[in-house]
Amino acid sequence: MLILLVQLARITLSRRIFNESVNSSVNCRNPIFREENWDYTQGMRPVYLNSPQKINPSEMRFCFGVLSSDLMSCCDKNTISSIYSLFKLHKSYLQKTVDFFIGAIRDTFNDFDPENQKDYGREFDEKGNYLERCNKNNSYSIPGQNYLSKGKLKEWKEQDKALAEKGRGRPMNRGIRRFRPQVFELSRSSQQALANYTRSVNSYMLDLAAKASVCLTGIMKHLAGILSFSCTPHWQAFFANATTLILKNDVCQELQKGCVEFLENLETLQEKVNRSKEAIVREVGQKVDLEDLELLTLPPAKFCKGECSSFVCNFWVEGSNGVTPYSSFFEHIETVDTLKHSSVAYKYSKEGYDSYSVGEKSGFGTAVTVDGQTSYINLGRSLVFGTVLGLLGII
């Protein structure tokens, strides 16, 4: 009962603030950016001007797309700097979370590739740690061995490029890396089958990473546009009421282009990974220690419930406050429904605010790279991958 009363009080306060704001045609009282409505779990709130001021366009290094013809703004250069820091915080967290989520699966499977087992000890120490420590000459070192030359490092980089072209990936210490000598006791045909299974997963996860890159880049464009929106004193034109922000139809359409396919693939990921694990178990049986593979378990992800378009355009990008999307989404992939619902709703119309286009032109640096992938438009890799999975009977 107490919680209900508090919520009603907040709604009443929000409506009063909104009504007061409407009485002034140009002001800095955008309800979703006011301090009393800000969700501080999503980061520090930028400090906005109390009233609009004419600003020098050169100070609008970012958010220039919302600067009106009268040059009035609710942001000064310090506000812009805080907005950019908030944007980078969410981009970095989301990128790292998704990168590790996808990369850990890819690395765990890649470690069973016989060719990667042959490399064991060359770029990893005896505990399986990826060698990132450098000496003063920027050369990698392996305990008990001399420092590796820069020439050797260059050779490894060239090898990695060649591996990527063949669909093979080199584990990067996000999964569990260890030496598995039993792999070399398998017959040649079993070793080849093991390589095929691991490389098919590698290709699938890289393709998923590329789709994630496109999706997250779109979400970052939207976020950049929403944060830019906080600077305009003409915000009232895009509010239906204090808790409903009207966005342009194109925003949802652009987010759907990048994210629906990725989310649908994500929902079926558990099934595909389990099929690949079962195929490897059938091939090698008890001949190779598969504990690490068996420990790789994915929770069922059914967050879309057949409505991925609605999920991305509303729940995901609305986040908990209508400003910042859920950066922690991948940490709660099994229990998305428990995340706090936003107090601000998005409504889409042809006359709404175009957060996507504004963010695209904001200069924020919205491109997101996931596990080295920046675009899923790679027909050659997709065709090869589909053929391999089909031949292996995994799909």
Image: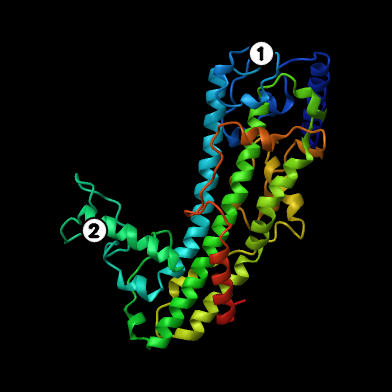
In this view, the residue in front, 165 or 124, is 165
User: What whole-number distance in Å separates the C-alpha atoms at marks 2 and 1?
Assistant: 59 Å
As drawn, is 72 to the left or to the right of 91? Answer: right
Q: Relative to 13, is 309 above or below?
A: below
Q: Which residue is drawn at 53% across and 81% down?
A: 279
Residue lying farthest front? 380
- Please report whichever mark, 2 or 1, sits nearer to the chain's N-terminal start: 1
In this orientation, does residue 326 appear? no
- Camera-near label (2 vs 1) is 2
Identify which amino acid the numbered label 2 is placed on: Lys
Query: x, y (%) of residue 79?
Result: 57, 21
As drawn, is 4 to the left or to the right of 138? Answer: right
* Residue designated by label 1: 50
Q: Give the crowd class for mark 1: few <14, some 14-19, many >=20 residues within 10 Å.
A: few
Query: x, y (%) of residue 217?
Result: 59, 45
In the rendered image, the quadrant that contains the C terminus is bottom right
- Secondary element under disc 1, as helix, strand or loop, is loop
* Residue designated by label 2: 152
- Secondary element under disc 2, as helix, strand or loop, is helix
Which of the 4 image quarters holds residue 360?
Answer: top right
Which of the 4 image quarters holds residue 232?
Answer: top right
In the rendered image, the quadrant that contains the N terminus is top right
Q: Residue at x 83, y 14 (%)?
A: 23
Identify which amino acid the numbered label 1 is placed on: Asn
Q: Residue at x 52, y 76 (%)?
A: 277
As drawn, is 192 to the left or to the right of 227? Answer: left
In this view, the residue in front, 335 or 371, is 371
Q: Relative to 68, is 284 above or below?
A: below
Q: Relative to 41, is 267 above or below?
A: below
